[in-house]
Image (spheres, grey):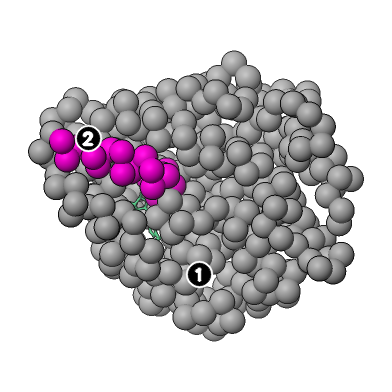
Amino acid sequence: MSEAETNMEWCVSMPKVELHAHLNGSIRDSTLLELARVLGEKGVIVFSDVEHVILKNDRSLRDVFKLFDLIHVLTTDHTTVTRITKEVIEDFASENVVYLELRTTPKKNDSIGMTKRSYLEAVMEGLRAVSTVDVAFPAHNVDAGSPTKSLPVNDMCNGPTRKKIYVRLLLSIDRRESTAAAMETVKLALEMKDLGVVGIDLSGNPVVGEWNTFLPALQFARENGLYITLHCGEVPNPKEIQAMLDFSPRRIGHACYFEEDDWKKLKSNNIPVEICLTSNIVTASVSSLDAHHFANLYSGKHPLVLCTDDAGVFSTSLSSEYNLAASAFGLGKRELFLLAKNAIEFIFASDGVKQDLRRTFDLASNKMDL
Ligand SMILES: CNc1ncnc2c1ncn2[C@@H]1O[C@H](COP(=O)(O)O)[C@@H](O)[C@H]1O
Ligand SMILES: [Zn+2]
């Protein structure tokens, strides 16, 4: 193996920044199966019917959204929301993700007394429940407000330094929601702003809903200081793509079905793109890695960040996404490291956090054999 060649172990040891991860899409298969078994025993579902759905690997975009409906049945109650949040953070931290923006759709479920607020409180409880790593989160006492020490990463050679991960939350608006429901989510985000909620995401089945339904809530969010990221161009919808780019979000996810005018607008507005390679290939939003827009954006030095989207649903990890980019696009260690480090510039957290993360990468770079 040549000096510059990467491998999975190296990608795991590299510090990384994750900016596009859906909570309910990032659950371990083992947890989903365990939850399904329990609901099977209670007679709520038939375990054998859902087992193969959970373990299936190739999924169309339609299958993915059917799977989310099933996952949401498995994770309905507050205790489970807390548990999956804890596990998802621990899983990202275990592969040296040092900053995580975790997004989730606040859910209301009258039958179990769940409000959007109590859902979010259950998520925050999950952040506090993390035990394998220190979580830097404003609502937690290992606070990141005035960071003094850089995060220990890649500590394999340094013995038992305790890892730390910054976590911030984005609240997702589901495209099935009404303007009023979207507004409720934005108001909740504003109430929880001091507790680590930094922005709003628009996601959900891309063939459902109209841009104009969400626009008032997104405008209101932005006017009140929340950052916005949009799922944009996951399916061909030229009018919506143009309207979304005209809105000038802080970042967008995917950008798969872009036409020439869309690229022009994206590039002239310098909007960073969250790239989810495995997700795009599995859902066939892009036909192959050779045809993926990563290559063009990367060579044009357009701001971009590699992300997982749904590490559980697509059986991937952030380290695998970096490893995949290395092999598909011929990136060496140094290029991967700079790509990972550059993601700091697009995070929705404070300059203090950015500075601390830059220090973390600089310290790691000495040990990373670049
Ligand atoms: C594959 N590409 C995708 N495109 C659009 N939306 C997606 C998505 N992957 C996930 N979600 C959105 O995230 C929800 C699950 O997490 P939460 O319940 O919010 O934690 C899904 O129901 C969907 O609305
Ligand atoms: Zn997504």
Quadrant the N terminus occupies: bottom right
- Pick whichever, 117 or 80, lies toward us: 80
Q: Residue furthest left?
A: 43
Residue drawn at x 17%, y 40% as measured from the top left = 40
Tell me where residue 93 sits by quadrant.
top right
Q: Amino acid at mark 1?
A: Ala
The correct choice, above or below, for 116 with respect to 242 in the image is above
Left or right? Give the position of 119 relative to 319.
Answer: left
* Quarter assignment of residue 156: top right
Q: Which percent across, then down, holds residue 358?
A: 78, 42
**SS state under label 1:** loop
Residue that carries the numbered disc 1 in the rendered image: 255
Neighbour class for label 1 at 10 Å: few (<14), some, many (≥20)?
A: many
**Residue span colored magenta:** 22-41
Specify which label sits upstream in the sequence, 1 or 2. 2
Residue that extends furthest to the top in the rendered view of this protein = 141
| Residue hosting label 2 | 38
- Asked whether residue 122 appears in the rendered view, the answer is yes
In the displayed structure image, the side of residue 61 where residue 320 appears, left or right = right
